[in-house]
Image (cartoon, grey):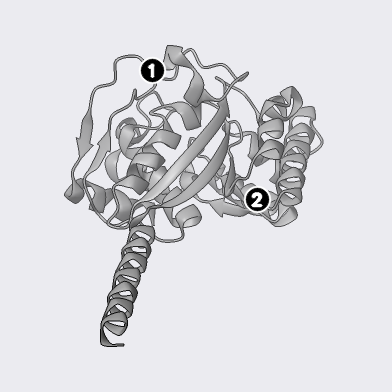
């Protein structure tokens, strides 16, 4: 009876060790999130989705972000809703977040009594509602990436409009415009918006930090962030018929850029 008992104890010990190793491996596996982006050049310049992925991967507890991005130069949310591509992607797979970015300045019409009834304004409001309703039907949270205007007065209109449409669509506002206008006050418009419209790399990193807080659920910690993809310019040959991530013409010859932890600390502070 002694030998069988010893063997049983040994077998149990091996089993428990194996279970412990499996549990440890599961704990070590990164959390995974799928995020769908819909917007235009304010999203694809410097490749905000890829920057967000790189930032999340850099963390002490890394998060594996998968993205699909439907964008085109100068496009509006109404354009993207009408072409049906992003809506089909939303309905066809599980998504942890839908990020909507309207064409720069359009949202301001919603808090202007004279422009509220314009064709573009009504189309924008409808597109927000339609995307939000489809997201709700599949259980996907919606985030509005609130953009920026040329001055504080215009920015105030955009911020109020973003809050207004968010309250109507049960969405959460990511206040990118407010943060970047504040950054421009400190660093200058040229350093923040090099061509007066599109974000600098620092500005894109600020938005990525805000996305991390909103979607991952915590502010990122300062860490080296490796950007090993093409930092797309405003005139990139982006098309809206397929996800940006699958478009070979955008791959180019990326140069590896490492943003050091001390620089990221400044970026994260600017994002808050």
Give residue 11's position: percent from left, percent from top.
Answer: 32, 72
Q: Residue at x 22, y 27 (%)?
A: 256
**Distance from label 1 to label 2 (Cα)?**
29 Å
Q: Is residue 181 visible?
A: no
Residue lying farthest bottom? 1
Q: Secondary structure at mark 2?
A: loop
169 sits to left or right of 147: right
Q: Are marks 1 and 2 in contact (CB under 8 Å)?
A: no
Q: Secondary structure at mark 1?
A: loop
Q: Residue at x 44, y 44 (%)?
A: 65
Q: Residue at x 51, y 24 (%)?
A: 244
Q: Alpha-carbon neighbours of circle 2 within 10 Å: few (<14), some, or many (≥20)? A: many
Number of numbered discs: 2
Circle on res. 251: 1
Image position of 29 with respect to 101: above or below: below
Say which quadrant the C terminus sits in.
bottom left
Say which quadrant the N terminus sits in.
bottom left
Image position of 156 with respect to 36: above or below: below
Give residue 78's position: percent from left, percent from top.
Answer: 72, 29
Give residue 129's position: percent from left, percent from top.
Answer: 76, 44
Circle on res. 140: 2
Instruction: Using the rendered view, name the quadrant where residue 241 is placed.
Output: top right
Q: Alpha-carbon neighbours of circle 1 within 10 Å: few (<14), some, or many (≥20)? A: some
Residue lying farthest front? 1
């Amino acid at each position: 009876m002694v030998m069988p008992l010893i063997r049983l104890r040994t077998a149990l010990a091996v089993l428990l060790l194996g279970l412990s190793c499996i549990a440890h491996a599961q704990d070590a596996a990164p959390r995974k999130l799928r995020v769908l982006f819909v917007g235009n050049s304010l999203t694809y310049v410097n490749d905000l989705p890829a920057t967000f992925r790189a930032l999340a991967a850099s963390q002490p507890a890394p998060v594996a972000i998968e993205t699909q991005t439907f964008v085109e130069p100068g496009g509006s949310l109404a354009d993207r809703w009408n072409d049906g591509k992003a809506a089909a992607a939303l309905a066809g797979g599980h998504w942890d977040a839908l990020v909507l970015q309207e064409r720069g300045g359009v949202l301001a019409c919603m808090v202007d009594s004279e422009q509220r009834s314009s064709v573009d304004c009504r189309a924008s409001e409808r597109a927000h509602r339609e995307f939000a309703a489809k997201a709700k039907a599949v259980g996907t949270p919606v985030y509005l990436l609130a953009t920026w205007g040329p001055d504080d007065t215009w920015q105030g209109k955009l911020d109020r409009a973003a809050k207004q449409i968010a309250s109507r669509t049960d969405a959460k506002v990511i206040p990118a415009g407010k943060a970047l206008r504040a950054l421009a006050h400190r660093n200058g418009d040229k350093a923040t918006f090099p061509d007066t419209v599109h974000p600098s790399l620092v500005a894109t990193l600020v938005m990525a930090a805000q996305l991390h807080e909103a979607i991952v659920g915590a502010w990122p910690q300062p860490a080296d962030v490796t950007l090993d993809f093409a930092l797309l310019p405003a005139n990139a040959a982006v098309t809206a018929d397929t996800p940006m991530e699958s478009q070979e013409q955008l791959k180019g010859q990326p140069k590896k850029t490492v943003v050091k932890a001390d620089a990221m600390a400044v970026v994260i502070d600017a994002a808050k």
